[in-house]
Amino acid sequence: MKIYSLLVIFFVSLLICIPAQPTKSCGPDLSFSGYSFLMPNIVDLDSEWAPYYFQFQNVYNYYDSAQLLQTKSNLEEWQEIFCQQVEIKDLEQIIYRSEVPALKRLRTAVQNEKYPLDPRWRRNSFALHLKANRCLETVNYLIFAKECEPYVVSPDDRWAAPGRDANKMQTLIEKGEKAFRKTRSNYIRLRYAYQLIRLAHYRKDYEQTLALHDRLLPRTDSIESIINDWILGHKAGAMMRLGQNVEASYLFSLIFARRPEKRHSAFKSFYVKTDEEWTACLLMCQDDHERANLYALRAGTSTAKVVEEMIKIYELDSQNAILELLLAREIKKLERDLLGLEFNDRKRENKMFHNLPRKGAPRELIALQEFVIRLVEEGRVRQPQLWQIARGYLEFLAGDDYAARQTFALIKPQIINETLKTQLATFELALWIDNLEDIDNETEEEISDIITDHPMYARFKDFPDFLNDRLAHAYREQGDVGKAFRCQYNLKHLLPNPDLAIINNLLEICRKEDKTRFEEALVTDRDGNSLENDLLDAKGTYYLARGQMETALEVFRLLPREAWDKYKLNPFIEQLNDCLDCPLLRDTIEYNKVTMIQRIFELEYRAKADFQHGAEYYYELGKAYYNITYFGHSWYVADFFRSGANWYYDKDNVYSDYYAPLGNLENHDCSRARAYFERAAAVAETAKNYELAARATFMAAKCEHNDYYLSKEYKWAGPNQIPKFPAAYQRNFQLLRDRYAPTAFYQEAIAECKYFEAFTRY
Amino acid sequence: MSRLIGYVGIIAIYLVATIACQDVSPPKPTKIAFYHWKTIVTQDSLSQIFLDRLDVQDLYVRFFDVDWDGGVAVPISELEVKQPWHQSLNIIPTIFITNRTLEQLSRTEMSTLGERIFKKIKTIQSKFQFNISEIQMDCDWTASTGMAYFELLRGLHRRCRNENLTLSATIRLHQIKYFKSTGVPPVDRGMLMYYNMGRLADSTEVNSILQLETARAYHQNFDRYPLPLDVALPLFRWGVVLRDGKLLKLINGLSEADLEDHTRFHKVGEKQYTLRKSTYLQGHYLYAGDRIRLENVEIELLQQAVLELAPQLQQPPERIVFYHLDSTMLKPYRYEDLFTVGHLFR
């Protein structure tokens, strides 16, 4: 047998033998697998604070959303300035989707009553308003802002060099400053100031940035506008570049708290180097709310010990909404660490690939619990009931289910807010599921009711997995191994290594007359068919693979007659070189598992009874037993799953595979086949049928070699190299060479098998 | 018989001629170079002294990184030159590309990316008037990104050949030992990164930057590696911050002097500290109980590493490149010592 043919078998088997996978991908799913029952909207996570909550993890999406937010805020402010008389979409068209020439034509139209608007803008409420009210200053500003754009907006193609020509930018600054002086509108002057300060900042002239700020802003009257904070951002950026990072960080903290569209950049820009700088930054704050925001910035980093920062925020500003976000973020982290830890079926992978639960999680939980209890008792927070519910959930996460139940029961009658009501109901359901044990018929009926009727069960995607994992654990504890298995897996996951206890447990349920609804679901497939026949097939195959043919036949006979023909097979066809995908000689006879076993029984009887042809019968039996092993073309008779990679030493022939929770048992044992081949050779020798004796000896040699591949002694000889078989695995080759060299089969074997050919030469 | 003598004579003449025509000149002496891995180029006197005294002619300069951002491959952290180097320095643009970029792009998109990288390099070169004769690509490619990366290199290699430029690529130690499975990048030269070989995140690690024992385990297949190799050596230090036995962050350039304040830091072992109280340290806010492991490369360790590496190489490297040119990192070293390190390869 050539090594490459084994490799071919391996690769081809990979393609053809692996059935539908339990996961959608073509490999194991290594992502974290756990549960979460915290509602996203409980703390306004869909609000502008969401990126902060998620620690800006999905920054790429955030950039887009920040840009959109900035555009939205800007347009809304323009709309506000024009007393809601213009539509947002019209503002957007002119401010963001026009070019300088079009704006210049707009200016002409505004200046000259008879000059019409651009046809595109004849129905544009903003253009009409500008023309009707002769808003020349606004149009001039828009033209100027558009001229600044190439210098302050990143090019779409980020590979292109940014066109920031410092001289041209300076010319624009000078031009803008003149326009600033000429402009009467306070609001437009503020916008000019913003454009000029931004230009200077992007020109990297930080002194000029600050000088422009100090020169222009006193010349605009105080006005409420987002532009003030945008200007502040450029001022802070320049100060940071000039080494004034304490002042700059303080300004960034203000922007962080006030401007959602600038929150991420402010968070990233905030930079304090030393304890002294931190203290100085705190001293710059005008009030405790501002000081609390500094701690919120520090809590936002991925390496923060959040509870420590929450305590500081609370002490400074107990009503700060950020506390709720931080609470939710901490609960989410702790859920990943602790929720369902006892029964999560992916616990091992979570530890291995995600290092979860974190070593410090219990300590963090205790710290958070202490803090939450303090807040509940003091009652100074924005939403006391939210914190009370959180207290109960943390008790649940800590494993104190009794306390959790008490806390939930206490708060339940007081809650009016619908979101909080829903959240509490969710936590209560999670707690109920977590407490499931000693499951009897009554509990199973309750479970069925929850699955079909509980509104929270359907609403939270993690409930089915949470319930299944919990039930599997409970059933396992009470010895219902079949139910435990079915809670987490389909029957196809059992087939790579059928487990008799599981099969029998499930068959028992199939035959039960008064099944609960839940049991009915466990022994029914997705199409509503009973699993009984498949279980019987698995059970019969289990015995067949172990050579217990009488028992196998007994089990297969329990199947309805029409189910026998599910498999068409013929393991009696000879194949000298193992090959799974080679076309076999067609035989007119096709068997099913029942008739195959009957044929085996018949051959065994005849082999003993008919001495003259005994060798042939033994040879037939050898072929059948060989071909239903892992190495034979009819491997699927005694196995449901075969991996081409699994032919190396393993203590019990069970190979771990991600699709097989109980491992994949490979039917490697060639001992029965070998015994029949050797018997066939011995009887043929006595009957002087040397051709058959040679043939049977060759087949016995194949069994010997397979034993070697699977032994601890096996050593890979390298690509395209014939392995060096120890003498103990060469007995039949030696016999073939020494005893049957004159036979025609001997030549056939040399031609067919490179191993044997090499063996005869050396 | 006379015919045999004739054949032997011809063979002898051929052998003599062959041997005589071989280049018997000694290998070129190994040159010392540096990596410049900062975004902004400014000059400081210490760096300048090292450049001058070590007669550095080549500087590997990080021009930009290529990363995946917003659904596209983009250049980030582009080089900014505030104070230029001396014009005579030969600049080798070095581009780091992230694995996540390679994971996202198809094979066909690699040629476009290669073209963009090449053009960007040329733009920066002409903007700052650099002399360049080589381009270096840096990527810690994996089994899943190797194919894409090599495709990118193939395109760049063609482009470099057209302009008489050498293309080199960084090579990690394991990529030499297992070169048959990891593959050999299709470039002219390799730059062996002889550092970052330990288990950084392991709380029991002593020095993940340079570990002789770990390095020895990878001293295999150098004789069969098909690319000529230069060698990059570490001249940096950092503090590894751990919490609950888990890596939290790295603080570059951290030294014992930064942890002398006993009210904040408690020395618990050789180069091991715990924080007595929460504090800012070089812009990082750390919490009481966090641990810091200082890692650096003493000159003796570096010399020993070179002594062990040198015999593995098929030929002395053309360059050894110290990572990296930064006055804070250079402070603990004397240029004479670095000169000696360079000589150990010769």
Image (spheres, coloured by chain):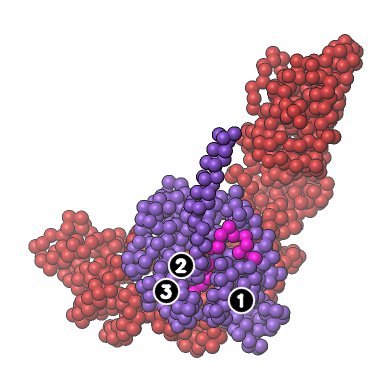
Chain colours: A red, B purple
Q: In this view, does A635 lie above or below A373?
A: above
Question: At 69% across and 22% down in the image, what residue appears?
Answer: A751
Q: Are marks 2 and 1 on the same chain?
A: yes
Residue A275 location, quadrant? bottom right
Judge by depth and name the residue closer to the eye, B264 or A82. B264
Please tell me which of labels 2 and 1 falls first in the chain. Answer: 2
Question: At 42% across and 79% down in the image, what residue appears?
Answer: B43
The numbered disc on residue B40 is 3
Give the distance between the C-alpha atoms of the residues marked 3 and 1, in whole angstroms: 28 Å
Instruction: Say which of marks 3 and 2 sits in front.
Output: 2
Residue A319 lies, in percent from the top left, at 54, 78
Judge the density around disc 1: few (<14), some (14-19), many (≥20) Cα neighbours within 10 Å: some
Residue type highlighted by circle 1: Ile
Question: At 77% across and 33% down in the image, what residue appears?
Answer: A706
* First to last magenta residue range: B308-325
- Which quadrant does the N terminus of chain B fall into? top right
User: Does residue A577 appear in the picture of this structure?
Assistant: yes
Q: In this view, does A501 lie above or below B212?
A: above
Please tell me which of labels 3 and 2 falls first in the chain. Answer: 3
Residue A467 lies, in percent from the top left, at 69, 51
